[in-house]
Amino acid sequence: MAERSLLNQLVDAFRCLPGVGPKSAQRMAFHLLDRNREGGRHLASVLAAAMERIKHCKRCRTLSEHELCGLCANPSRDGSLLCVIEHPSEIVAIEQATDFRGLYFMLGGRLSPLDGIGPEELGLNLLDERLKEGEIKELILAISPTVEGSATSHYIADIASRYQVRTTRIAHGVPLGGELEYVDGGTLAHAFAGRQSVEN
């Protein structure tokens, strides 16, 4: 079988990005090769460095170049409030839309046994350890209200109840079945202000 051309390999490489189909990937590849080779070299350099150096914060599991991310290392953050989110992009959304000054814990997804995603894959053992330390007084669940999200929220609320930690969830205006990262800032701020207790 003939070796695939470098151009075809480049087009296929762009297809690993979410929402990028064959036509978009081809457009990106041709743009860099025809009009912006310097931009392509810069992209390749930064991408290689990011893949090598960005890891996960050992405390909250979000993306970080350091052992502790900037938020976990910031002594002015309120360690008694812990907001559980699914993806790092949601930290950016919450920080921009609300006045939340606590800390975060990033799951990286939702419980989904059929997809092989259980408590261990979401780092819930690490969350358990943090709750056991006794500093956290309120656990805020900012998890998308899908079926899997609801199951994940209840599972986490059960863990928190073992340590008598108050568990709330954001509410008001976040649509059922909606993805949190796509909710507008005003709605997200309102949802945060109107969080409710989670019944066990």
Image: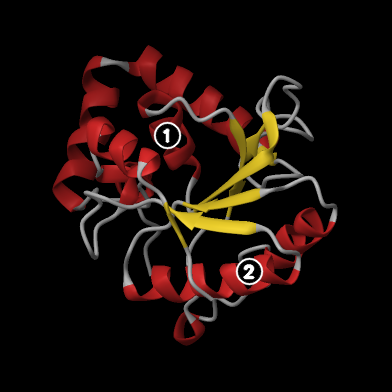
Q: Position of residue 121 (x, y in %)?
A: 63, 69
Q: Secondary structure at mark 1?
A: helix
Height in image: 187 above or below 197? above
Q: Position of residue 129 (x, y in %)?
A: 81, 59
Q: Position of residue 4 (x, y in %)?
A: 36, 55
Residue 11, quarter of the rendered image:
top left
Q: Residue at x 79, y 35 (%)?
A: 67
- Disc 1 marks which residue? 94
Quadrant where the C terminus is found in the figure: bottom right
Amino acid type assigned to the residue bearing label 1 in the image: Ile
- Disc 2 marks which residue? 121
Amino acid type assigned to the residue bearing label 2 in the image: Glu
Q: Secondary structure at mark 2?
A: loop
Farthest residue, direction bottom: 114
Q: Residue at x 54, y 23 (%)?
A: 45
Question: Disc number at residue 84?
Answer: none
Who is closer to the viewer here, 144 or 9?
144
Residue 22 in the figure: left or right of residue 126: left
Height in image: 45 above or below 150? above
Height in image: 134 above or below 49? below
Q: Position of residue 53 (x, y in %)?
A: 69, 33
Q: CA distance from mark 2 to mark 1?
A: 24 Å
Packing grade of label 1 (10 A; few <14, some 14-19, many >=20) is many
